[in-house]
Amino acid sequence: MGRKVALGGILTAINIILLYLASYMPSMKLTMYFLSGLMPGLILVEMGARQAWLLYSAVSLMSLLILGNPINIIPYIFIFGLFPLVKYYIEKTRIIYIEIVLKLLFFNIAFLSIYFIWTRLFLVGVILPIPIIWLILGLQIVSVLYDYIFTRMIFYYCDRIRIFWRKD
């Protein structure tokens, strides 16, 4: 029990630091979001889905309270923090075509939600320099690429890093 609490607390703190850096380092924003999205994936591997949901909820709530700028936290809440959990449940089907379709559906709903929150709730104007069809196709490619890189990072963690620090 103590190990779960300690690991959850450490990963929560690291996650909030990464989101803080994403807020104040514009050139590293996507990298920090990606790294912060790995934390729920790592806790999912180590402790299971319940702990991953707790970490995601704690980081989302604490980052909104501590960091203060909800516009910078929205990508984590809707995409990067939620994706490992959604990916976990989608990949239980073990049918590759259904997995791909469901993951693309998740990304499309998440991007659409962020767009409506930014434009309607925060009244942030979004000017698209390219036609909308190219943006949609580009998002599909980026989504598949993100899923692939995320999976490779989790496999790397399981194969190379986890072995050295686990004492089970």
Image (tube, rainbow, N blue to C red):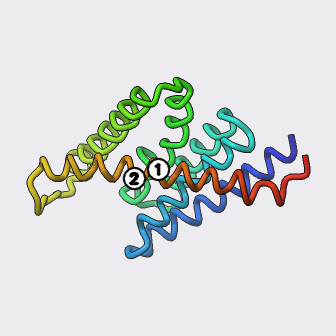
Q: CA distance from mark 1 to mark 2?
A: 5 Å
CB within 8 Å, label 1 to label 2: yes
Residue 57 vs residue 83: left or right?
Answer: right
Q: Label 2, secondary structure: give it.
A: helix
According to the picture, the residue beneath numbered tag 1 turns out to be: 148
Q: Residue at the spot x=51%, y=47% of the render?
A: 81
Residue type indicated by callout 1: Tyr
Q: Position of residue 142 (x, y in %)?
A: 33, 53
Count the numbered circles shown: 2
Q: Residue at the spot x=52%, y=23% of the render?
A: 93
Q: Position of residue 110 (x, y in %)?
A: 34, 41
Q: Residue at the spot x=42%, y=68% of the render?
A: 29
Residue type indicated by callout 2: Leu
Q: Is residue 139 above or below residue 87?
A: below
Residue 145's tag is: 2
* Location of the N terminus (image quadrant): top right
Front-lying residue, 52 or 148: 148
Q: Label 1, secondary structure: give it.
A: helix
Residue 45 vs residue 137: left or right?
Answer: right
